[in-house]
């Protein structure tokens, strides 16, 4: 029994703190933005800045072999650059009010909603910030499952 306890203690001691993992995710998101390099990288950086402005306690994660995910009491939004667009996907978008009709993809689903940004599209920053706040509020008010590996603090 003492051996098992020693192994557990050793495993806990070698685990990196959540802050390191969150910092690593932030660096990978920085690298993704740099690697994309064109208007999609600029748009992704703009979206990320809006998320951070709305949610100073946001947790940045790197999921599914290359997807930036933002969490607050559970995952609430992810963003990916595609060939011709940047997709901003809300995990519980079907539950959110969208009075400015920002959602333009995934409208038939019963959970997710997305906004596809194409080259030249302007971001309605006020409306997007409101939608991000609503997503955070949804997670805070409901029992939303946390992702495996959710971090407990920002950078």
Image (tube, rainbow, N blue to C red):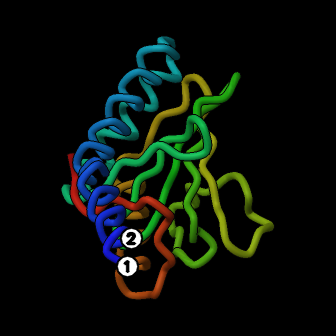
Q: Secondary structure at mark 1?
A: loop
Circles 2, 1 touching at the beta carbon (< 8 Å): yes
Crowd class of label 1 (few under 14; some 14 to 19; many from 20; radius 10 Å) = few
Crowd class of label 2 (few under 14; some 14 to 19; many from 20; radius 10 Å) = few
Q: Secondary structure at mark 2?
A: helix
Residue at numbered disc 2: 4
Image location of residue 40, percent across then percent down: 53, 23
Residue at numbered disc 1: 1
Q: Quadrant of the N terminus?
A: bottom left
* Marks 2 and 1, how far apart at CA: 5 Å
Q: Is 135 left or right of 58, judged from the image as shown?
A: right
Seen at 21% across and 45% down, the residue is 155
Q: Quadrant of residue 120?
A: top right
Q: Is 80 left or right of 111, judged from the image as shown?
A: left
From this view, report whether residue 136 is shown above or below residue 65: below
Q: Residue furthest right?
A: 108
Frontmost residue, 77 versus 84: 77
């Amino acid at each position: 029994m003492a051996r098992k306890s020693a192994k557990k203690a050793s495993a806990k001691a070698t685990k990196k703190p959540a802050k390191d993992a969150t910092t690593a995710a932030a660096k990978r998101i920085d690298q993704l933005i740099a690697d994309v390099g064109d208007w999609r990288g600029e748009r992704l950086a703009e979206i990320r800045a809006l998320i951070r402005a709305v949610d100073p306690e946001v947790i940045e994660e790197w999921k599914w072999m290359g997807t930036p995910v933002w969490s607050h009491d559970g995952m609430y939004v992810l963003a990916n650059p595609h060939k011709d667009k940047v997709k901003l996907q809300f995990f519980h978008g079907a539950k959110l009010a969208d009075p400015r009709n920002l959602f333009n993809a995934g409208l038939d689903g019963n959970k997710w909603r997305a906004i596809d940004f194409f080259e030249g599209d302007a971001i309605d920053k006020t409306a997007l910030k409101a939608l991000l706040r609503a997503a955070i509020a949804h997670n805070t008010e409901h029992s939303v499952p946390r992702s495996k590996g959710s971090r407990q603090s920002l950078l």
